[in-house]
Image (cartoon, rainbow, N blue to C red):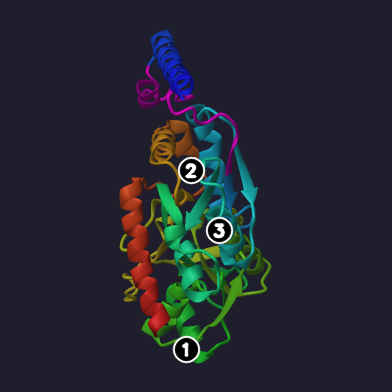
Amino acid sequence: MKKTNLFKGLMALTMASLLTLAGCGQDSSTNEKANGESTSDTALNYPTKPIKIINPFSAGGPADNTSRILAHHAEEFVGESMIIENRDGGGGSIGQTAGASANPDGYTLTLITSSIVSNPIFNEVSYTHESFEPVIMTVNDPFFLVVSKDAPFDDADSFLEYAKENPGEISIGVSGSQTVPAFTAKELTEKTGIELTTVPFDGEALAVAAAAGGHIQALIGNFSGIESQVNSGTLKPILLFDSERSELASDVPTAQESGIDIISGSWRGIAVPAGTDPEIIEYLHEAFKVTTEKQEYQDQMINSGIGITYRSPEEFKAIIADTYNKYMKFAEK
């Protein structure tokens, strides 16, 4: 027993000496991170291998773009390569299940959206929003009402007029059946008295493709998901569900300008499984925060039509809780 204790004591002393020498031989990792130059944290010994980010949605959509742009620019600050793994299906629940049940060691992250709240409320899944610990919120995108170039309407007034004269004839695409876009479509019908046929897709990219191909007449989505089709003329945004016009499409009126009291959008960010070491969460948060302050990152996000909104883990957690309270109201109707 005494030999064991002596051995442990010597090992502790040796490790302390090594850490001291490492600290003397290089700048403090905390200072390096603040200066945007850090790649590792000796005391934490993390990370030591590539980090995976699960994107629970299909490739090519705004969520996918968000995760890939962030991962690309964050590698130099995180200190390891970051791999995006698309695990789409079930309105995000397949990838979210994998993310929530992953080993909480900091090597499996999840790109989260409000669907981590809605899926457990409206579907049988093995996790809740509390199965995740927020790391950082990076995006809060308002939704646009978008129409196909071949649709018999090209602005909000003609859209509403046609919908009233032809109940149920307008097919409107949304990402998932119990998601913010789906709830926004429901709000639109309730507050305007129109009747729409809502078509859920497994990811916004599929809804955009359907609208661009003329298979549906309209959709609700983020500008990043429709930008290329808008530029080519196949899709046209006619309404923005926000209180102020967007710099991304300044000619598009807000819903409030049209007398429709709806503000709606999607937040996105990074989370880890519940139970992850708080020091790892803080390390990742600081690395991602420095990333979001990088000009090249901001330029690429804006050029991709994605708005940038930073929130800390504590602020992000409060937003998730607020989203839960709002969704529960829909569930109780």
Give yes or no for contact between labels 3 and 2 (Cβ–Cβ under 8 Å): no
Q: What residue is shown with label 3?
A: 96
User: Where does residue 323 sit, x and y in percent of width and height?
Assistant: 37, 65
Main SS of the magenta segment? loop
Q: In this view, does 248 lie to the left or right of 57?
A: left
Q: What residue type is labelled 2?
A: Met
- Which of the two discs, 3 and 1, labels the residue nearer the N terminus? 3
Q: Earlier in the sequence, mark 3 or mark 2?
A: 3
SS at mark 2 in the image: helix
Q: Can you give x and y, in whole percent of width and height, for residue 136 in the image?
A: 40, 46
As for residue 43 lying within the magenta part, the answer is yes
Crowd tier of the residue under label 1, counting other residues whose Cα lies within 10 Å: few below 14, some 14–19, many 20 or above: some
Q: Disc 3 marks which amino acid? A: Gln
Q: How far apart are marks 1 and 2 (CA)?
A: 38 Å
Q: Mark 2 points at which residue?
A: 301
Residue at image mark 1: 164
Residue at 38 percent of width and 55 percent of height: 246
Residue 253, horizontal then vertical, whole percent: 38, 65
- Residue located 34% across and 70% down the image: 325
Identity of the residue drawn at 32% across and 70% down = 257
Circle 1 — which element? helix
Q: Quadrant of residue 168?
A: bottom right
Check the image and report above or below for 246 versus 32. Answer: below
- Dot 2 alpha-carbon crowd within 10 angstroms: few under 14, some 14 to 19, many 20 or more: many
Residue flagged by tag 1: what amino acid is it? Lys
Residues in magenta, as a range: 28-52
* Disc assigned to residue 234: none
Q: Is residue 306 visible?
A: no
